Amino acid sequence: MPRDKLPKLFDGSVNELTKPSRLKAGDRSRSSLKSEKKQKTLYVTLDMNRKLIELYGEEGRRQSTIVEDAVNLYYYLKKALGEKKFNELLSAVGREDPEFLAEYISKLRV
């Protein structure tokens, strides 16, 4: 059997583990991708962890659901507002002042 036909064995490197798998485009439908569970490791600041715990306690939902909603909100706000207005909104959020943010959002025109 020629060498180029032999299957490649796992070499134990981090690069090998982090490469995306080679799937054909038609192998998975969009609906299965939405429901398929993926485990990700998120590194967050202590302040962000406190906020997550507070939201978890108030809403009684799983932290993964809160993170998923936050990512969807971030993604669609960025698409809807455009780069400039989205960056302005992020700077308003960075002030960590709920009253200022409420006033800013009420004045926001898309």
Image (cartoon, rainbow, N blue to C red):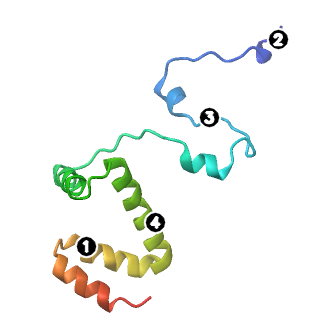
Does residue 98 appear to the left or right of 28 in the view shown? left
The vertical placement of 109 against 86, above or below, is below
Q: Secondary structure at mark 2?
A: loop
Q: Residue 21 got which mark?
A: 3
C-alpha gap between disc 2 and disc 1: 60 Å
Alpha-carbon neighbours of circle 2 within 10 Å: few (<14), some, or many (≥20)? Answer: few
Q: Residue 73 appears at what percent x and percent y?
A: 41, 67
Task: Using the rendered view, name the quadrant where residue 55 is placed.
Answer: bottom left
* Secondary structure at numbered mark 3: loop
Give the position of the C terminus as an image quadrant: bottom left
Q: Residue at x 50, y 73 (%)?
A: 79
Image quadrant for the N terminus? top right
Residue 9, image x, y percentages: 62, 15
Q: Earlier in the sequence, mark 3 or mark 2?
A: 2
Q: Which residue is mark 4?
A: 75
What residue is pinned by disc 1? 93
Question: Which residue was labeled with disc 2?
Answer: 2
Element class at badge 4:
helix
Mark before the other along the chain sequence, 1 or 4: 4
The picture quadrant where one finds residue 68 is: bottom left
Give amino acid for label 1: Val
